[in-house]
Image: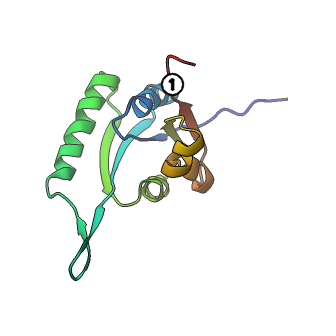
Amino acid sequence: MSTASLDVRKVLVPLDFSDPSQRAMQYARRFAEPSQAELILLYVIEPVAYPAELGVVINLDADLTERAQSELQKLREQHLGDYSNARCLVRSGVADTEIVTCAGDEQVDLIVIGTHGFSGLKHLLLGSTAERVVRDAKCPVLTVRHHTDDD
């Protein structure tokens, strides 16, 4: 029986600047290094809608994209250091939808996404972006579970 190797050329790492997503970036680097695959660091800005007198208004801070790009760049330098085959992307929309769309647009071979590990009522109320990405993505998805001191 032969084992097929995973040909990884592009790895998508959705980030929300949390510890779990930063941990996922470290895992992604390990997958990317052997083949010098491209790491795509993605942050999704979710627009905030609030009611106004004449309907719903979507509020997007004009320099939010620029600030997100700057934060991604800092994380890249902090966690990837000398790994040069990485780039940062910022999109706006619903996080899980944008992650799956970006994976298709960029033709990624793997998505590496952190999970917060919420359960019970917190999971019910907040949902799980990672869970929806696993369900909808066309490529393999590696979820990196967040560990707490209680684990």
Image: 120 above or below 55: above
Image: 122 above or below 149: below
Quadrant assignment for the N terminus:
top right
Name the outermost residue toward the right: 1
Name the outermost residue toward the bottom: 54
- Asked whether residue 109 is in view, the answer is no
Q: Position of residue 91 (x, y in %)?
A: 32, 55
How crowded pointer 1 is (Cα within 10 Å; few <14, some 14-19, many 20+) is rated as: few
Pointer 1: what residue? 34
| In the foreground, 126 or 147 | 126
| In the foreground, 132 or 37 | 132
Q: Residue at x 18, y 44 (%)?
A: 67
Q: Residue at x 66, y 32 (%)?
A: 5
Quadrant assignment for the C terminus:
top right
Q: Position of residue 19 (x, y in %)?
A: 39, 28
- Asked whether residue 111 is in view, the answer is yes
Which quarter of the picture shows residue 82?
Answer: top left
At label 1, which amino acid type do we have? Pro
Q: How is the image coloured?
A: rainbow
Q: Position of residue 25 (x, y in %)?
A: 42, 31
Number of on-image labels: 1
Residue 134 falls left or right of residue 90: right
Q: Residue at x 14, y 53 (%)?
A: 63
| In the foreground, 19 or 27 | 19
Residue 62 falls left or right of residue 57: left
Check disc 1 and report its element: helix, strand or loop: helix
Q: Residue at x 59, y 56 (%)?
A: 136
